[in-house]
Amino acid sequence: MKTAAIIGLIGTALLCHAQAAPFKFDEASYRTDVQTLASDEFEGRAPLSHGEKLTVEYLESAYKSMGLKPAFGDSYRQSVPMAKITADQNMQLKVGKLTFSNGNEFTARTEQVEPSVTLDNNDMVFVGYGINAPEYQWNDYANVDVKGKTVILLVNDPGFATQDPNVFKGNAMTYYGRWTYKYEEAARQGAKAVFIVHETAPAAYGWNVVQNSNTNSKFTLVDKNNNRSHIGVMGWIQHATAQKIFAEAGFDYDQLKLKAAKPGFKSLPLKLKASLKLDNQIELATSYNVAGLLPGSTQADEWLVMHAHWDHLGKTLKDGKTHIYNGAVDNASGVAGVLQLGRYFKSLKGDAAPKRSMLFATFTAEETGLIGAQYFAENPPVATKQLVSFLNIDGMNVGKGVDYILRYGENVSELEQYLDDAAKAQGRTVKADPRPQNGLMFRSDHFALAQQGVPGLMFMSLGDTDPDYIAHKYHQQADDYDPNWNLGGVSQDLSLISDILNKLANNNDWPKWLEESDFKKRRAKDGL
């Protein structure tokens, strides 16, 4: 059939579906949702805390009140079994004659469900970027044995270091640049510990983010072997710490870093020993993903997912004072956006009601490694071949509206055309991710679904519409609700998202992956 005929049939099909009423932003309810979720009473919404109990109850009540059905059988909650691991923060890292303090000079944690993990005069090896990527003809682990050893490696990937578009993807981070990959690959190579050297530009955030994110309780899913296949010690070290360690070994860190970005770099033993003891308190418990379902009018077995993670960093006790990380923008703002969209689509009646089912979801433990999303992706309420797309909000523009929308990734999936069309309808342009080196495409819950083959879009404004946010608010106490927020950006973005969802809910399209990737291969296994 000719393209014009296909387009005509699609147009006819759309005409048969009643035009939905335009999305209308309810500012009062949005402010109430954000202010409540980001209040001190909710204690920063850490998983397995009193703050989680309040958050889950609030979300469950919201889904019930708007008339959505339970998403997981007869429950709005999906149980996510996990371990809460709290390391004693009085640890020290000893390297040769040097001793480093936790928090200021290094951080260390583990996902192994063990009361203690110990490095006892453990051999150290520098493995460059710690990447094994056959498609880029790159293997930092070639001809080096790291089994049972401690590896030091660099954050991001050689493309960022060289700014050469012919090396990996140049300035744009690949998944090989993410810290999650670094730990996974080192574990596959048999290493016992990893320390990633932190530098602000390639990491995309300051040491304060590393410190706040890694010196309190962390969460993990638990396999039948108590995660013994995971890396034993997951660490970061300051740039200055790395320089001291390499000097102790007789090397210049900054010179070796330059060499590590060139093809053919050979990893090398540092001829130093590392010692560290992680003493852990372990709590095995259940956290919850929370979601409400709007069944489709005629194609109920085809699902769209609209999502935001509900968790943040919780509270900590430092210097005798309680510090609460309320995460108002990250991500109470996104959760409130999902609730707005849920109320809107539930209000559509008759022929305007969506044909496909719509899941309005909020997951746990995104901040500690997409844990709730990973569990959902591996245990979805319907088969992944029934999931059309996964749209994800991870921080909204709470300021004034802007004349553009950000796109994360380029030529990744056909969903990008939906973004282009919705932006054009608003008189806005689509702006490429201004910081592709930050790897944001791999840092939020949609990525866990992408790994299962489900295409997605991420909506995030952190650090773009508010340049001060990353430096002074991201994962810090200053990320609080402000009654002076303009919210023009929230209104326009929710309207844009509702446009995309309306089209996907009614046009029978199955957006496809564009670039060759594991995502595309996984989708092909589902016959899509």
Image (tube, rainbow, N blue to C red):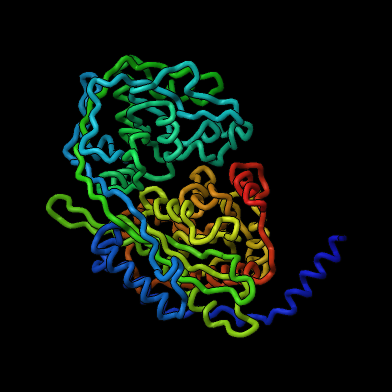
Residue at x 14%, y 50% (from the top left corner): 319
**Quarter of the N terminus within the rendering:** bottom right
On the image, the x and y values in percent for residue 317 come to 17, 53
Q: Quadrant of residue 191?
A: top left
Image height check: is 105 above or below 331?
Answer: above
Q: Nearer the viewer, residue 462 or 379?
A: 379
Residue at x 56%, y 56% (from the top left corner): 384
427 vs 59, left or right, is right
On the image, the x and y values in percent for residue 80 come to 36, 56
Residue at x 63%, y 47% (from the top left corner): 525
- Residue 398 in view: no
438 vs 289, left or right, is right
Q: Nearer the viewer, residue 440 or 340?
A: 340
- Residue 104 in view: yes
Q: Quadrant of residue 512?
A: bottom right
Q: Quadrant of residue 200?
A: top left
On the image, the x and y values in percent for residue 179 come to 42, 39
Image height check: is 263 above or below 315?
Answer: above
